[in-house]
Image: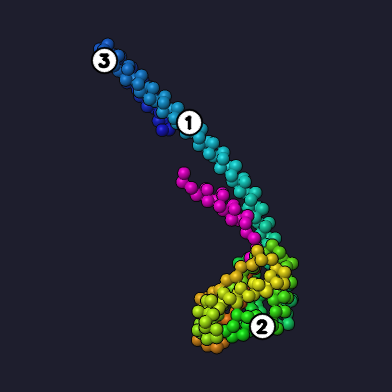
Amino acid sequence: MKLSAIILKAMVALAMVGVLTSCISKKKYEEAMTRAAAEKSALESSLATAQEENDDLKGKISTMEGNLNMKSEEIVSLTEQIKVNNGKIANLQNAIKEAFSSFDSNDIQVEEKGGKLYITMANKVLFEAGRDRIKKESKDVLATLAGVLKDNGDLSILVEGHTDNDPVVIHKARFKDNWSLSVARSLNVVRELVANGVKEGRLTASGKGETMPVSDNMSDEGKEKNRRTEFVIVPKIDGLYKMYKSDFAGMGSSN
């Protein structure tokens, strides 16, 4: 209850008492005084409650102001972290382009998207059709890539295998479908990178099969584009997730 409403109610009650004393009997006057006293006690209780609520609200406002100041500092820190990550991605992009400058741009592509670096290798660079074993002459390609990745040790690497929609013909006993073939290929690529010095904890193998085409599967050209291995280089975003989890999510609570 607002303080102004409480005060107004008390004034009305006192006025009523004044009126009653001038025109009613002693008994009724005493009864009225008793009721007035009870009303006064209730008003005082309401006033105390309102004061407690007001103090509590002030405390919450003070806490929120402190949190806002903290978030401002975190945002500045995260902005700097993002700048550093963007710089690392840009440097890595240039290093990989230089390392594979002798390759056809259709065979090895390097592109930055959304703060991540995507390295796409055509299937023919690493594998024979329908097979998961890395070609002997292609191991130098992964050794070159590993050499660049080792210089950027705080970046995570997701290796994705992709296929066209043609059914598996070779090694049908081993590969039930394109999904299992793409998984096997990505695992072999990861193992080759590890053999060339990239730390295991940075690597994740993933097979997408035919589920994420970049072209149609109606032509040989389209199918060739869909058969690929992608390396997704991801900077650390621990700070951003931590701030969302501990602060922004808490601000959305209704309790």
| Crowd band around label 3 with a 10 angstrom C-alpha radius: few (<14), some (14–19), many (20+) | few
When the figure is inspected, residue 39 is found, relative to residue 86, above or below; the finding is above
Please give the label number shown on residue 135.
2
What residue is shown with label 1?
52
Q: What is the span of residues highlighted in magenta in the rendered image?
A: 234-255
Residue 181, quarter of picture: bottom right
- Mark nearer the N terminus (2 vs 1): 1
Which quarter of the figure is the N terminus placed in? Answer: top left
Badge 1 vs badge 3, beta-carbon distance below 8 Å: no
Residue lying farthest to the bottom in this orientation: 220
Relative to 5, 82 lies left or right: right
Q: Nearer the viewer, mark 1 or mark 3?
A: 1
User: In the image, what residue occupies the spot 40% across and 30% down?
Assistant: 5
Residue lying farthest to the top in this orientation: 26
User: In the image, what residue occupies the spot 26% across and 12% down?
Assistant: 27
Residue 243 in the image: state x and y as whole percent: 59, 52
Residue 159 lies in the magenta-colored region: no
Residue 31 in the image: state x and y as whole percent: 29, 16
Which colour scheme appears in the figure?
Answer: rainbow
User: In the image, what residue occupies the spot 72% across and 79% down?
Assistant: 140
Residue 193, quarter of picture: bottom right
Q: Amino acid at mark 3?
A: Lys
Quick one: SS at disc 1? helix
Which sits in the foreground, 125 or 62?
125
Q: CA distance from mark 1 to mark 3?
A: 36 Å
Residue 247 lies in the magenta-colored region: yes
Quick one: SS at disc 2? loop
> Magenta region, mostly helix, strand or loop?
helix
Quick one: SS at disc 3? helix
What residue is shown with label 3?
28
Count the marks: 3
